[in-house]
Image (cartoon, coloured by chain):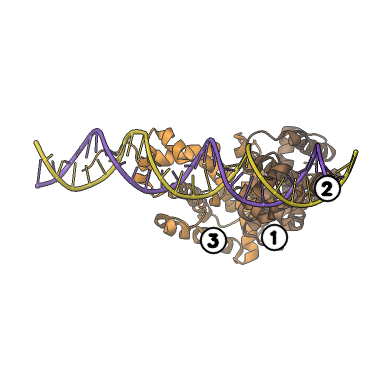
Chain colours: A brown, B orange, C yellow, D purple
Amino acid sequence: MGRIAKFDRDDLTRAALELAAERGPGAVTVAALSAAVGAPTGSIYHRFESREALLAEIWMDVVESFQHGFIARLAEADDVRGAAAAARFMAEWVKEHPLEARLLLLHHRKDFVSGKWPASLVERAAALEPAMGAALGGFAKRAFGRADREVIARVRFALLDAPFGGIKPYVQEGKPLPPGFDQMVTATVRAVLGGKAR
Amino acid sequence: MGRIAKFDRDDLTRAALELAAERGPGAVTVAALSAAVGAPTGSIYHRFESREALLAEIWMDVVESFQHGFIARLAEADDVRGAAAAARFMAEWVKEHPLEARLLLLHHRKDFVSGKWPASLVERAAALEPAMGAALGGFAKRAFGRADREVIARVRFALLDAPFGGIKPYVQEGKPLPPGFDQMVTATVRAVLGGKAR
DNA sequence: CCCATATTAGAACGTACGTTCTAGAACAAT
DNA sequence: ATTGTTCTAGAACGTACGTTCTAATATGGG
């Protein structure tokens, strides 16, 4: 019962994602957002508690999108070869999700959720780090028989941080990745994680 | 002639750097800045044309600080071994300049200079990219005999982007780099730039 | 000593923003 | 048809911010 909604959550998150990807999270003002979807500012507050809640939600969606895919890929890996495949996932994901990539690679969490997570997201937020930690630790154990700090640091560097650094400039310029990019990532993984168990 | 100044440019840029490093560029409000140095807001405008001009200046100082050091290191390199030494420079610089590192690694230029560079900085800004390009190209030519796009992309990845990605999480958390970090960077350089000329 | 000047000091102004408020419209159930 | 509810619509409000304005204060030169 009640009047039919002209603007649903998805319209708003989608428009917010586009605004944030193109002009940064600061450009996601309530006025700009309502102008983008053609809604009055008040309507936004029928769907979201606050601007911060909306921003936190799109950030959460993006992080989960990447993390789920990456973890799924890493779950299949039990050696350096499989790890390299997981490392290449970020480049794939960026191609398939250009807008989301701009959020994840060009900004930090604090630009989207400055203080605490809104109540509706605390559970998902709390699950984020442990899930990634378990995935990396599980792989380390399978591939190297141990999951101490030193190994985890190497795995994280090779599979996440180095690819991240390499991709970022291209996302920033809005240009496609160079031809040899996957080979560079693969070479990095092999070098850092060792030809054998190391 | 004229009254003696209680607050000079350096007091202000220093305080702005600290604010930006600790709480992000958004925290560098004119009010926060004047409170930090104990000056009235009006005095800031005796030294800087605008808040944006001040932010642009501290960004420029930081970028130049890193870039000059890196380029100097790279200028001494003519093979993969020398390149690895240049790649390790970022980790050194971060240790020596923790505040500056937080600016350079945790934010983008657009957070500090959103539109055009202020007139006082356009020359320095214009020199930034060519200097880095020349340094990378020069090294590529010395080490590999060519400086085409593909080689430059590899050099940039190995010497700048990958170390950048690897260092960023530690700067973010305010933690020291892990023990094996330099070896990971070195291994990456060797793997991506090839054992020999490749 | 006095004047020009550079600066401190902080109030004042305009604007942009997030949020809330008031009014009205559309739909479902009775 | 009436009522309750959910939404649109946009004006209104309070706040935080960058900037400018007015006044006072200290310094050096004539």
The answer to whether A19 appears left or right of B1 in the picture is right
Say which amino acid is labelled 3. Answer: Gly
Residue of label 2 = A73
Label 3: which secondary element: helix
| Gap between marks 3 and 2 measured at Cα | 36 Å
Of residues A168 and A7, the one drawn nearer to the viewer in this rendering: A7
Do the dots labelled 3 and 2 sit on one chain? no
Q: Eyeballing the image, is A133 above or below B68?
A: above
Q: Is any atom of residue A157 visible in this view?
A: no
The first of marks 1 and 2 along the sequence is 2
Of residues A115 and A73, the one drawn nearer to the viewer in this rendering: A115
Q: Find out whether the residues at labels 1 and 3 contact each other: C-beta distance under 8 Å.
A: no
Q: Check the picture and name the quadrant holding the C terminus of chain A.
A: top right
Do the dots labelled 1 and 3 sit on one chain? no
Say which amino acid is labelled 1. Answer: Leu
What is the x, y in percent for residue A58?
72, 46
The answer to whether B96 appears left or right of A157 in the picture is left
Q: Is any atom of residue B197 visible in this view?
A: yes
Provide the chain ID for the residue under circle 2.
Answer: A
Label 2: which secondary element: helix
**Image mark for residue A95:** none
For marks 3 and 2, give the one nearer the viewer.
2
Residue of label 1 = A177
What is the x, y in percent for residue A148?
75, 32
Say which amino acid is labelled 2. Answer: Arg
**Image mark for residue B133:** 3
Label 1: which secondary element: loop
Of residues B33 and A95, the one drawn nearer to the viewer in this rendering: B33
Mark 1 Cα within 10 Å, few/some/many (few <14, many 20+)? some
